[in-house]
Amino acid sequence: MLEQLREDIGVIFDRDPAARSTWEVVTCYPGFHAMVFHRVAHRLWNTGLRWMGRWLAHLARWFTGIEIHPGATIGRRFFIDHGMGVVIGETSVIGDDCTLYHGVTLGGTSWNKGKRHPTLGNNVVIGAGAVVTKDIAERGIYAGNPARKIRNL
């Protein structure tokens, strides 16, 4: 757990030139807070304590402005910059080394049970305000509504 927290703090320094100290990151970065909450909520969800996972995710949304369903699967070194208004649905899968900016929605496309939210591959950046409704397998930078690739990484 401590190693994961160190990695989360390190990725913020790697991707945000405004980050000045570890104390600042730990106390003032809602994306960091959202991921700490999500890890606990996801564990609760996966062990069958689904109401508790949803409640913790709800508390995190109130605290951070970032909504991550506890069923979402998120890889390593994930970074949410600013974060207000980010929504990550229950069946979303996010690969390693991905970045989301504020206002991004990984949105559902169906009322049917099963996979209904997009999957992001590794090394994907989603720009502010983008709405993603389809899987993004390749690395790159995506923006818009609906999100489309604007350049390679």
Image (tube, rainbow, N blue to C red):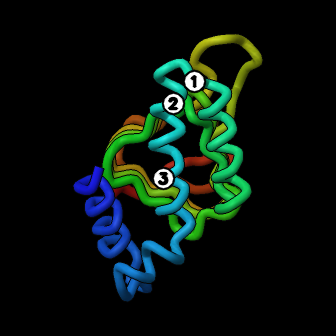
Label 2, label 3: how far apart the Cα atoms are: 14 Å
Per the image, label 1 sits on a secondary structure element best described as loop
- Viewer-proximal residue among 69 and 108: 69
Label 1, label 2: how far apart the Cα atoms are: 5 Å
Q: Earlier in the sequence, mark 1 or mark 2?
A: 2
Per the image, label 2 sits on a secondary structure element best described as helix
- The residue that disc 3 covers is 35
- Viewer-proximal residue among 14 and 31: 31
Q: Residue at x 61, y 30 (%)?
A: 90
Q: How many marks?
A: 3
C-beta proximity under 8 Å, tags 2 and 3 = no
Amino acid type for the residue under numbered disc 1: Leu
Q: Is residue 42 above or below residue 25?
A: above
**Residue 2 at x, y = what percent?**
27, 56
Per the image, label 3 sits on a secondary structure element best described as helix
Amino acid type for the residue under numbered disc 2: Leu
Q: Is residue 99 above or below residue 95?
A: below
| Residue 132, quarter of the rendered image | top right
Label 1, label 3: how far apart the Cα atoms are: 18 Å
C-beta proximity under 8 Å, tags 1 and 3 = no
Q: Residue at x 34, y 67 (%)?
A: 9
Q: Earlier in the sequence, mark 1 or mark 3?
A: 3
Amino acid type for the residue under numbered disc 3: Met
Residue 49 tag number? 1
Q: Earlier in the sequence, mark 2 or mark 3?
A: 3
Q: Residue at x 67, y 11 (%)?
A: 113
Residue 141 visible: no
Residue 44 tag number? 2
- Would residue 129 appear left or right of 33 to someone viewing this image? right
C-beta proximity under 8 Å, tags 1 and 2 = yes
